[in-house]
Image (cartoon, helix red, strand yellow):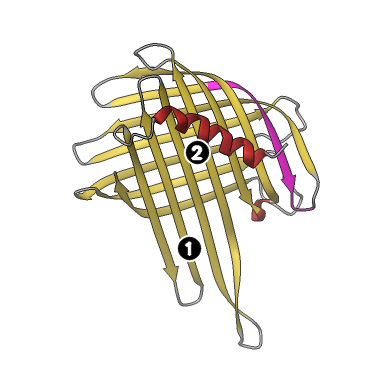
């Protein structure tokens, strides 16, 4: 079974509900570039595309997230070489079939991630279950989805892992003012078997409108894997400042 094909299939099933109309589509394009010189020379590029669609019977969401970092290292003889120190690609798609006019829905989700510096050639997951909104008021909201699923991982050494998971995802939004908002997302794919890998992800962000559709975003991202190679860390963190374009 091709798990990348599974993700694409889920995206196409969700997109088929769109009737090729773009009217209910919103999204964000995020780009952050960081360069340092002096004793340490590095360059980092972080990009993200998120798209949300809200149709009569379906809510769909798509995400593409990338991170690339290079370091320029000075050797003992004075020569310099460039080394890639981070390279991550992540894509996901989720379709929610609405059960009523509120926010309760049945969801299907698929994701693919390639992060060779974390010890994984690829991490794939699919899940299905129930989604709903815990609360919503004039300034804040909290949504969740939860359900069983399946993961398939391929490690850098060529070995593979697969098994059952329980996926839980939370999204909290708080509008601080007319021009600023706070957002917290968290997801975990808890392995059913205790010796399998559990992957958790979190993003804490604060964004402020600059002008028109442009915003400035500061974010702190955490990725945690319980089972990694001996020479790898369990947790990766990224702090970034990015420009957002909203559409």
Q: Nearer the viewer, residue 40 or 101?
A: 101
> Percent from the top left, x then y, of residue 215?
27, 49
Determine whether label 1 and label 2 are within 8 Å by CB.
no
Secondary structure state at the residue bearing disc 1: strand
**Residue in the picture at 42% in, 40% down:** 204
**Residue 227 appears in the figure:** no
> Percent from the top left, x then y, of residue 247?
29, 43
Q: Is residue 60 above or below residue 41?
A: above
Residue that protrudes farthest toward the front in the picture? 19
Q: Which residue is mark 1?
A: 44
**Residue 86 appears in the figure:** yes
Q: Which residues are magenta?
A: 146-157
- The image's mark for residue 93 is none
- The image's mark for residue 202 is 2
Q: Is residue 187 above or below residue 233?
A: above
State left or right for residue 84 relative to residue 44: right
Q: Is residue 147 above or below residue 244?
A: above
State left or right for residue 32 relative to residue 41: left
Instruction: Count residues near mark 2 (Cα–Cα under 10 Å), then give few for <14, some for 14-19, many for 20+.
Output: some
**Residue in the picture at 58% in, 59% down:** 86
């Amino acid at each position: 079974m091709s798990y990348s094909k599974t993700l694409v299939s889920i995206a196409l099933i969700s997109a088929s509900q769109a009737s090729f109309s773009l009217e209910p589509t919103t999204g964000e394009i995020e780009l952050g570039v960081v360069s340092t010189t002096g004793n340490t020379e590095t360059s980092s590029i972080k990009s993200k595309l998120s798209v949300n669609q809200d149709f009569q019977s379906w809510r769909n969401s798509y995400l593409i997230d990338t991170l690339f970092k290079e370091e320029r290292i000075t050797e003992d003889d004075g020569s310099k070489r460039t080394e890639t120190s981070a390279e991550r690609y992540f894509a996901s798609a989720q379709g929610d079939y609405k059960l009523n006019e509120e926010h309760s829905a049945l969801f299907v989700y698929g994701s693919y991630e390639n992060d060779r510096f974390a010890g994984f050639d690829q991490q794939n997951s699919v899940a299905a279950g129930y989604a709903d909104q815990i609360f919503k008021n004039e300034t804040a909201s909290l949504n969740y989805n939860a359900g069983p699923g399946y993961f398939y991982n391929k490690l850098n050494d060529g070995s593979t892992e697969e098994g059952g998971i329980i996926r839980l995802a939370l999204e909290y939004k708080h509008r601080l003012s007319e021009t600023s908002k706070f957002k917290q997302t968290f997801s975990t794919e808890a392995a059913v078997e205790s010796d399998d890998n559990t992957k958790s992800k979190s993003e804490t962000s604060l964004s402020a409108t600059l002008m028109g559709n442009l915003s400035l975003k500061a974010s702190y991202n955490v990725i945690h894997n319980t089972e990694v190679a001996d020479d790898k860390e369990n947790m990766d963190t990224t702090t970034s400042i990015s420009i957002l374009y909203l559409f």
